Amino acid sequence: MLMEPIDKFVRSQKLNGNARTLNASIHVAMVCSLLELDEDESSRIAEASARVFRLLKKELPLDSKYRKNYRMGTFMFNVEEIMSYIDANMTFGDSAKLFELMEVEKKKIAGESV
C-alpha cells in the first residue's frame, strides 16, 4: 500500500533498474524525504549510498551482469527523481494515503507522539 504510488511513478518514468538497485534508490529517497534533508544533504547521502553499491559490486563474480551494469550516476539520478516526486506529493497532496502515512512516520522520527 505504501509503495503503490511510488511504484507507479517509477514505472511511468521508466527509471533504470541499475543492476537491481532501484529499490535501494527508493529507500534512500524516502529516508531523505522523511528527514526533510535539503538538496545538498540528499545528494551527499545518495552519493555515499551509490559508492557503497559500487564497492559491493566488486564482490560479485566477474561475469555477473549486475557487476557490469551498475552506474553510480544512475543510482543518484533515481534517488533525485523519486525524492522530487515524494516531496512534490507531500507538498501538493497527490496520492493522499501514501503521504498521510509518511507524515505519521515523520512525526515518529521527530519524536512527536502519534
Image (cartoon, rainbow, N blue to C red):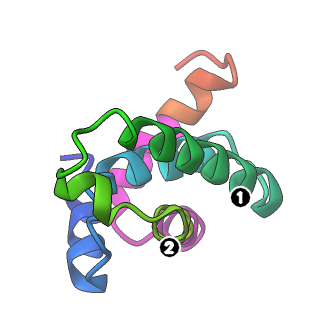
> Is residue 98 found left or right of 81 in the rendered image?
left
Name the element at disc 2. Answer: helix
Q: Is residue 20 visible?
A: no
Give the percent coordinates (x, y) of residue 108.
57, 22
> Is residue 57 found left or right of 52 in the rendered image?
left
Asked whether the residues under the numbered discs 1 and 2 touch, taking CB atoms below 8 Å apart as contact, a structural biologist would say no
Q: In which image quadrant can residue 110 be found?
A: top right
Give the percent coordinates (x, y) of residue 96.
36, 61
Look at label 2 and name its amino acid.
Glu
Secondary structure predominantly adopted by residues drawn in magenta: helix
> Label 1 to label 2, Cα distance in Å?
11 Å
Residue under numbered circle 1: 43
The residue that appears at 65% across and 44% down in the rendered structure is: 48
Give the percent coordinates (x, y) of residue 76.
55, 63
Label 1 vs label 2, nearer the camera: 1
> Is residue 45 found left or right of 86 in the rendered image?
right
Q: Nearer the viewer, residue 73 or 28?
A: 73
The residue that appears at 52% across and 20% down in the rendered structure is: 114
Residue under numbered circle 2: 81
Give the percent coordinates (x, y) of residue 28.
51, 45
- At label 1, counting other C-alpha atoms closer than 10 Å, the crowd grade (few under 14, some 14-19, many 20 or more) is some
Q: In which image quadrant can residue 22 be found?
A: bottom left
Q: Is residue 8 above or below residue 32?
A: below
Q: Which residues are magenta?
A: 81-104
Q: Is residue 32 visible?
A: yes
The residue that appears at 41% across and 36% down in the rendered structure is: 56
Q: Is residue 46 above or below residue 72?
A: above
Q: Nearer the viewer, residue 71 or 10?
A: 71
Of pointers 1 and 2, the one earlier in the residue sequence: 1
